[in-house]
Image (cartoon, coloured by chain):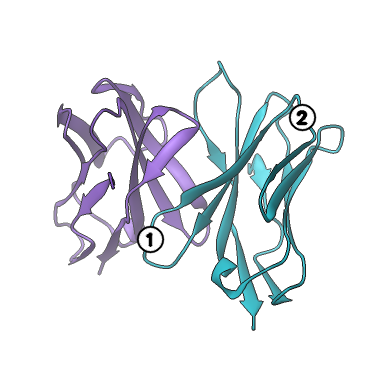
Chain colours: A purple, B cyan
Amino acid sequence: DARVTQTPRHKVTEMGQEVTMRCQPILGHNTVFWYRQTMMQGLELLAYFRNRAPLDDSGMPKDRFSAEMPDATLATLKIQPSEPRDSAVYFCASGTRVYEQYFGPGTRLTVT
Amino acid sequence: DQQVKQNSPSLSVQEGRISILNCDYTNSMFDYFLWYKKYPAEGPTFLISISSIKDKNEDGRFTVFLNKSAKHLSLHIVPSQPGDSAVYFCAAITQGGSEKLVFGKGTKLTVNP
């Protein structure tokens, strides 16, 4: 049963610290998405990649967020420095078509 | 500006009855619509979808209706079961366009035994 995995599942950190979230997409999926879920905004797309190339990161605050795919089995989302308003659940999803997305379980980030 | 709106944050129904979840959109370029279901501590999972060339799509207990003129879609669950209790997200996309799914904020459905 192929699944998207995300680590860590939970992260509590202090304001100003660097946070790195990792995602392993389903093998064979060439498109990877990063979403953020908050009560106020719902599910927002932060960035997505196809064949490891970034296609759109317009949803990401550029000054502090960065997303990369070092290889086909790993996607990372980094926040530096983190702020309390970054507290949210971050989801990674993978697929072969944009409207067929398989979500990971999410990373719940709390920034104090 | 929310392009996909789910105006009911929550809905409560009795087991065996019909659940109707609603979704409105503002972008007339959207031509494919999806519903995702999310349990606590899990990621959303795909439930059902509909293309704008149709006005109804059915899969077992789940039916999605699309009214393009009203820019409105709804998800019907009949009969509702306690296991259907979850948050339901509506999403929309323009195929061949920006390739980005736009999600609503979700509706929390509670099915009471």
Q: Is residue B16 above or below residue A41?
A: below
Q: Nearer the viewer, residue B112 or B107?
A: B112
Q: Give the number of marks.
A: 2
Q: Is residue A15 left or right of residue B11?
A: left
* Residue A21 placement (x, y as % from top left): 20, 49
Q: Nearer the viewer, residue A57 or B36?
A: B36
**Crowd class of label 1 (few under 14; some 14 to 19; many from 20; radius 10 Å):** some
Question: Pointer 1: what residue?
Answer: B42
As drawn, which residue projects farthest toward the right?
Answer: B69
Residue at point 73%, 27% (across, down): B52
Q: Is residue A15 above or below residue B49?
A: below
Relative to B94, is B68 above or below?
Answer: below
Structural distance between the alpha carbons of marks 2 and 1: 31 Å
Give the residue type at disc 2.
Lys
**Number of the label disc, if any, that sits on residue B54:** 2
Q: Nearer the viewer, mark 2 or mark 1?
A: 2
Q: Residue A38: image x %, image y %?
A: 45, 58
Residue B2 percent coordinates (x, y): 63, 44
Q: Label 2 marks which chain's residue?
A: B
**Chain holding disc 1:** B
As rendered, which of B34 and B2 lies closer to the eye?
A: B34
Residue situated furthest front in the rendering: B60
